[in-house]
Amino acid sequence: MLKNDKWIIEQAKTNGMIHPFVGSLISVDSEFPGIFGNVLSYGVSSFGYDLRLSAKSFRIFQHVPGTVMNPKAFNEENLRDVVLREDEYGEYFILPAHSYGLGVAVERLTIPRSITVVCIGKSTYARMGIILNVTPAESEWSGHLTLEFSNSSGADCRLYANEGVCQALFFEGEDCLTSYGDRSGKYQGQEESVVTARV
């Protein structure tokens, strides 16, 4: 069952499922005003929670001659940090055309045992050719999600920091036999920085 706003608010307030937590959908923000105060919405929606992109960490893939990407022996040289920029529209990273980047969510999630979280992209970015690829946050996973972005368009694109970038959907099932927390999974406890492939 897909969980609604009432459940999300209750879990966030009583069990700390989302931190920091915003109990409504924000589209005008006085803390990060941007132009005329408009922001890409974040916070609780009817059946989900719009997570924000952190300003602390964003990296894009680059070609290193003679190397092949290997998930079993990840080469950090294949990633480079992206500079956070700012103008009257707000703080942002630039994701070049036809490139792939990694960011991280502002919010720390602590997933209940009977829940799995799936993230989907926001329509504003999707209509610009930005494809979001986030793997599920499984039962009893905790941490800041690493967010994967592909710019499928032929133009460079801004990704705004501290504003909504994807929607988390919370699905409930029967309690599992073994949770991600029970297994002490390799991505457990991620901090607010990009985490690369681990084996």
Image: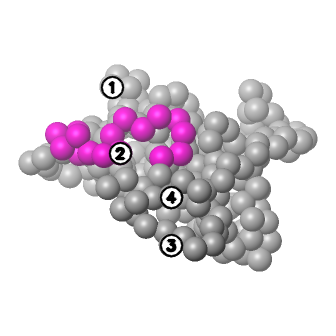
From mark 3 to mark 2, how far is it between C-alphas?
23 Å
Say whether disc 3 or disc 1 marks the residue closer to the N-terminus.
1
Percent across and percent down for residue 82 are 72, 49
Q: Which residue is mark 1?
A: 15
Amino acid type shown at disc 1: Asn
Say whether disc 1 or disc 2 marks the residue closer to the N-terminus.
1
Q: Which residue is mark 4?
A: 75
Residue 15 is drawn in which quadrant? top left
Percent across and percent down for residue 13 are 40, 24
Instruction: Name the residue nearer the viewer: 86 or 168.
Output: 86
Select label 1 or label 2 by which is in front.
2
Q: Is residue 93 above or below residue 151?
A: above
Instruction: Name the residue nearer the viewer: 168 or 100.
Output: 100
- Residue drawn at the location 46% of the way across and 39% of the way down: 144
- Residue drawn at the location 37% of the way across and 53% of the way down: 198
> Which element type, helix, strand or loop, lies under badge 1?
helix
Q: Quadrant of the C terminus?
A: bottom left
